[in-house]
Image (cartoon, helix red, strand yellow):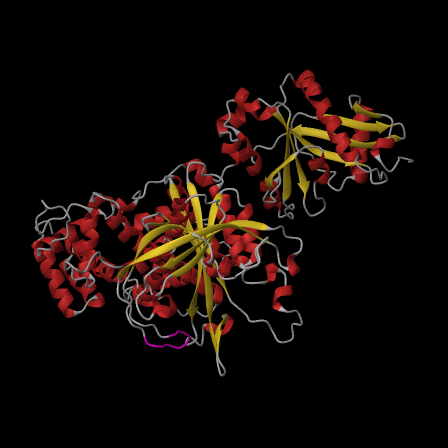
Amino acid sequence: MGVPDSVEKIREIRIVKAVAKEQKNLVYKLLKEDHPNSENVPPGPRETYLIYTEHGLVGAAVFTGAPKNSGPLNAWMGWSKAKRDAHINCVINMARFLVRPCVKCRNLASRLLSLLEARVPGDYMMDHRLHLCVLTTFVDSEAHSGACYRAAGWDEIGKTQGRGWRGPKIRAKGETPVSPKLVFVRTIDPDFRKRLGLPDLQWCTAPAWYRKGALSLHDGLSGGVQAFFERELEASPLGKGKRNRRAATTLGMLYDMPPAVISKAGGGLRKKSKGAYRFCETEEEQVTMENILAGHVECTCRRMMAQEVVFATIDGTEYNYDTKRGTNRDMGDIGRNQAHTSRGLVQYATLVHTAGGLPLGILKLTFAARNFRKPGDPRPSPNRPIEEKETNVWLEHAMHVNEVARWMPNTTVILLCDRESDFYQFLALAAKLPNVQVILRAKVSREVVGEKNPLFPLLAKSDECARMTVRVPRRSEQPKKPGQAARTERKAREAELSLSMRRVTFNPPARLRDEKPVTVSAVVAVEMDPPEPAYLERLHWIVLSTAELKRGSDAVACVEHYMRRWTIEEWHRVIKDCCRVEDLALRDIDHMKRAMTLKVLVAWFIMYRLKLGLKVDNLPVEDVFDELEAAVLRIVVMDMNLDVEDAETAKPGSLATARGAVKAVARLGGHLGRKGDGDPGLETFGSGTAVLAVMRKFSLALRRNLKQAIIMLVGEMSLSMILETVWQAFVWDGL
């Protein structure tokens, strides 16, 4: 045809509207000969064009009505069904766009798109008396990248599910479904949202949890554990509503007996245990660990929105399944000695919590089967790409936290990490994250730009900028265990720390020459008068922060923020010691991950309920426990004459606040409640939760049938607990 190889060399481009029958026939002839999807053009108002240059006919375009059921388009527009039906004709779809295959001209397609964008609105108004607001089109991602649309200023807004506008007819006739398409839009009228009464673009493109709004801390708890889990997993895309209900039922079952495995948590009822196993062992593609957690992540984000400051802590822990021979075949390596390799899984999680240690939820969860590098791999570990390393998980979690924080302009998000995150790629990423402040503990004494000494000796010579006092908790003695060092006893004490800080810049290592230098604030905290022996007890922390610290008070706040990282360690202890996740034994690793995800959620809820009662002052008991649980706890408090309320005017045997209720639950789990005991811990609260669940079931069954209640108790409690529970139940006149 003689078309030049670059659009700059073409002198004239003419967009000719196909009005005559011969012109329209020529358009469809071109499409039939050269377009891969020449048939089944969508219906609606049509504008057809032929495209000419001085070298001849080079292409064609067909515009039709916009699709009504495009999920990405409807989400981007942000309109309701009524608004969509009223204004759908203000959007037009470029159903077919063709540049003839024989034409090889660089940038021609994007130039033609710009010319069509300028021509179509006037013709649309003249032919149909309609004001055109938006152009849209769908691009087959398997065949094209959509580069010409991006070059012409179109925006990619999502991807279809592959049903096509003829989706129902295709399914009815048994035809092969179409491939998913990329959805592009081009705004013609900048004020169309105001003109049509639609929400702004930020609202339309925001995540679903952002549009739903913030959640209060105790929202949903008053309806009971089962109702709370149903609400928590409501947005989980598990395929069918009954799967969401099954997941919530399984969570409630595991919460009622935290240490038990699935079969025991069912209480001997085959139907309950079988339903839980079917959920964990299903082969449905939608039931994945990520999808199970999706609804909870959404609720976590909504709880974050209601806070002024939140902390997102990333940390890992290992689960040992070495003794589960039928389970550990697909597990990874978690430890080695001269004769044996332990098998298990590594969990990386981002736990969000408040400054007071109240866990708001799990933002991201990853299970990894760690495999040590094979001897045959010639590449040394530093030369392998970060994507092939386990440490890449830290980057993924940090980017996820930053993306969530982008939608929370009124909430300050502080990301806390342990020494495992102190590698250069993470520091480089942390310095670039605009929506979070990153604080981590240093492990590597790097060379500092402009200084003779590396980081650790340099900070040791820095001047003191502030002092602070921290409370070091008591630690019991622990003997040596396989894979775990012995631990000496430590008494609780008040430690005075001397703080020094400095702004430092690190150059990238030689293997990462493409990275830029990273500047961070470094704070060193050293205990001034440590007890003997000093080498075992002395506190010595070096903390790095991406925020610029200017005063001594900033250094104190940085160390205080880092100390809040301990919340995730408490959660790990609940998972292992209270919920006994390492007792699970399912044959397939994917089934194990589903069951572990449920256990992890149960551990979070135990911690959430306890901390909510202890940290929030004057919270009514009915806001944390349902009506029947509160009634049972009042029986326990009254019958045992417990003093669980902090108010001086409160009498023993009374129960009005959630703080008193969680203390009563802990008393059922073995907490003695003496003056020097302090607040109950997570293990006693978890044990008390199991006793409270049995009492609640018994109270509910007793209202219906005494025989059924006694049979239920025999399967779940010892004889002494049965007699005590029966007595406490009959004390309540309402039963």
Rendering quarter of residue 167:
top right
How many discs mark residues in the rendered view?
Answer: 0
Q: Which residues are magenta?
A: 479-485
Q: Is residue 33 something one can see in this rendering?
A: yes
Q: Nearer the viewer, residue 453 or 574?
A: 453
Q: Residue furthest bottom?
A: 339
Dominant SS type (magenta): loop
Residue 33 vs 542, above or below: the answer is above
Q: Residue furthest right?
A: 2
Residue 212 vs 493, above or below: the answer is above
Residue 3 vs 662, above or below: the answer is above
Viewed as shown, does residue 668 lie left or right of 329?
Answer: left
Quarter of the image with the N terminus is top right
Picture coordinates of residue 488 (x, y %)?
Answer: 32, 72
Rendering quarter of residue 188:
top right
Q: Nearer the viewer, residue 710 or 646?
A: 646
Q: Nearer the viewer, residue 228 or 286?
A: 228
Rendering quarter of residue 36:
top right
Q: Please tell me which residue is depicted at 77% across the width and 39% down the height of the picture.
A: 35
